[in-house]
Amino acid sequence: MMYKNPFTPVFGNEPPILAGRQRMIQDVITGLDNGPGDPNRVTIFTGPRGSGKTVLLATIAAAAESMGWISVHATAMPGMLDMLIEQIEEKGAEFLSVEQSGGVTGVQVSGFGITRELPDRKSVSFRTRASRYLKELEEQHIGLLITVDEVSADVPEMITLIDSFQHFIRERREIALLMAGLPNNVLQMFQHESISYLRRAFRKRLDSVSIPEVRMAIEDTVKLTGRTIDREALSVASEATNGFPFLIQLVGFYMFSQSDRKKISLEDAERGIEIAKIDMERMIIDSTVRALSDRDMDFLEAMSRDEEYSNISDVAKRIGASASLASHYKRRLAEQGIISSVGRGKIAFNIPMLKTWLRERGEQ
Ligand SMILES: Nc1ncnc2c1ncn2[C@@H]1O[C@H](COP(=O)(O)OP(=O)(O)OP(=O)(O)O)[C@@H](O)[C@H]1O
Ligand SMILES: [Mg+2]
């Protein structure tokens, strides 16, 4: 008998069971319930690759829709505002007085067919269009949730969106804006002077999930399929993820596919972890490392010689840097979510296996 593998080691794919994150989801949902003015209605999620940002946005959007909100989604890039408007028109079709004949997609009508309304519509700014729809939705007690993934200050439309949003908030509209991005990009956005408003947004870091929460998620995911898992296998697998969401799926996936027996054994788990490690290295570590400077790498390499954590002063000595230079590197790496402070003058790796990878690399 073949069991269908329930794990989703694919970026952006919603897992059947979410590990942790309940609090973050609940905060936003409460904010939507609460009404205009609730600070949770402008939230930015930050976290390294694979920490679950995209999935979190999608999960909250689904919850909002089940509360009767309309949710629209875009990735920060040119054209995003049009995409948002299109989705509002589509999802709000039954509530809005939009002329649906042709709609925005009227462009498809080729040649002379280009509609009378299109040039006009283009020239109407995002803010005006969105504002009109917001009023109409509000009359029917429908809120609008906008989620934007991969935010970056380099996208001018992002600035327009935030600027418009600021006005909607001032008008006390039923609207919420959730954003997600890599720590560095979010930081840059916050420094952009024309959207200082954003500094008021709640910034939430997607840290690693606690091991007990990982345990529960893995066990529940396995159970969905009718299989079970050996207790020790569950412990070993949970620990191996270090609470990192992508690894939960990766370890789960490979462990699950080791055999067809009803019960997942310790041996299945151990073999699954091995394969997951290789995949993890390829997918996450490579892309993370590529974004780092040589000096950052030296710093991390120096850190990798320690066991549980490193003293910044030791690391500084090893790379021959002054204390202030070392703390500058430390801050930068922490902002990117690669390391974090674990007490006075102490730092540790956030990304599981990056340390092992650095060590093995050093030995070559
Ligand atoms: N809370 C969670 N519990 C279990 N698995 C999760 C959780 N969140 C995300 N995942 C899994 O982790 C992987 C990465 O999730 P996601 O694509 O949301 O990450 P991301 O932070 O958006 O990454 P990127 O920065 O590359 O876009 C996916 O395989 C997803 O199924
Ligand atoms: Mg993502």
Image: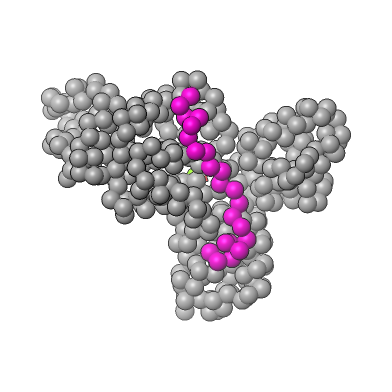
**Residue at screen point 47% across, 65% down:** 6
The reply, left or right, for residue 219 in relation to residue 36 is right
The reply, left or right, for residue 221 in relation to residue 117 is right
- Residue 133, by quadrant, is top left
Residue 129, above or below 275: above
Q: Is residue 283 visible?
A: no
- Residue 319, by quadrant, is top right
Q: Position of residue 357 (x, y in %)?
A: 72, 48
**Residue at screen point 38% across, 28% down:** 166
Query: Which of these two is toward me, 174 or 302?
Result: 174
Q: How is the image coloured?
A: one colour
Query: Which of these two is toward me, 122 or 343?
Result: 343
- Residue 128, by quadrant, is top left
**Residue at screen point 54% across, 76% down:** 228
The reply, left or right, for residue 275 in relation to residue 75 is right
Q: Position of residue 248 (x, y in %)?
A: 57, 59
Query: Which of these two is toward me, 212 or 102?
Result: 212
- In the image, the segment drawn in magenta is 196-217
The reply, left or right, for residue 16 in relation to residue 321 is left
Q: Position of residue 97 (x, y in %)?
A: 14, 37
Q: Is residue 307 visible?
A: yes
Residue 191 falls inside the magenta stretch: no
Total number of numbered discs in the rendering: 0
Q: Position of residue 72 (x, y in %)?
A: 33, 42
**Residue at screen point 62% across, 37% down:** 336
Query: Which of these two is toward me, 27 or 151?
Result: 27
